[in-house]
Amino acid sequence: MSLGRVILLNTGAAIPQIGLGTCSNPTEMENAVDIAIRNGYRHLDLAMVYRNQDEVGRALKKVIPSVVSREQLFITSKLWNSSHHLQVVEAELDETLKQLGLTYLDLYLVHWPAAFVPGNGLFPLRSDGEVHLDTKTSLVDTWKAMIKLLDTGKVKAIGVSNFNIAQIQGIIDATGVVPAINQIEAHSRLPQDDLLAYCKENGIHITAYSPLGNNFVGVPMLTENVVVQEVANKLGATPAQVLVAWGVYRGYSVIPKSAQESRIISNFKQVELSQEDCEKVSSIGVGNVRRYNIPETYKQKWNINIFGEEIERGAAVQVKIA
């Protein structure tokens, strides 16, 4: 089992430090969520674009209230890019709640600092096959719509995902409302120390996705790294447990994803790293930084510079903050 640790957000709410990521095949997700909750998970990370919230909702019906009460769960979902416009933000939230069979979310995030043209599905395409970007709606516009959701009672807290320092500061400067969380790709090859320091200074919690690396870009998972395996052998742990523990050591909440029962259970069995072990795992990224999730590289390309990575610098569109 996990150590049961929670982290207080700037709203005063407590988020369990280990959660289940659900970016997986819809056919597997009902069973995966059921298994997770019955084995102690209380933090679920969802998103409209994962296209499996109906399946998650069916799992929730099985375990609420027989296994847990709704109040014992911390459930996050995310506003997709095609719903950034002021007039459709709440409508997508309502659809998420309908799919899940819930009356509220504990946390609702702006999934990406990129808007798509609304009204043509999750991935509207241009004639050249690229995603059709909405270059008029700004992050500030969308954040103002998110703020209004707090008055509805349908969300307890709001935050962002995949935002950098300038993007976060821009929405704060315009509205005075600080996100509760910034959910980002974070692992030992992408520590993002500057962003972590900024968020800590401003009371914004970091949730780390892809803590084990990424197996979609043709490179080995971090679980295969010899340093991670050495630390795991020393602690009598799995490499995945070590990578989750690395994120915990740095103060993140961590949301490893899996649909396999054994891995769901194993990922929730926390181990603790010493400073020495943490530094060993951190050494993997020294001179070897790698961001795996860059929309500019997707098959259906988003022609927008989100992170300022080298591969994005020729993008036609810059993020519209205000």
Image (cartoon, grey):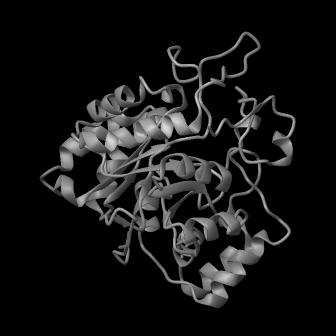
| Quadrant the C terminus occupies | top right
Image quadrant in which you'd find residue 261:
bottom left
Picture coordinates of residue 298 (x, y %)?
A: 72, 33
Q: Residue at x 42, y 73 (%)?
A: 269
Against 132, residue 221 (above or below) is: below
**Does residue 310 appear to the left or right of 235 in the view shown?**
right
Q: Residue at x 49, y 47 (%)?
A: 175
Q: Which of 65 and 181 is in front in this view?
A: 181
Q: Residue at x 51, y 30 (%)?
A: 84
**Does residue 156 appear to the left or right of 162 in the view shown?**
left
Picture coordinates of residue 220 (x, y %)?
A: 74, 57
Q: Which residue is drawn at 19% across and 52% down?
A: 70
Picture coordinates of residue 8 (x, y %)?
A: 37, 70
Against 289, residue 109 (above or below) is: above
Picture coordinates of residue 23 (x, y %)?
A: 50, 43
Against 38, residue 60 (above or below) is: above
Against 79, residue 309 (above or below) is: below
**Does residue 70 appear to the left or right of 251 in the view shown?**
left
Q: Nearer the viewer, residue 311 or 235?
A: 311
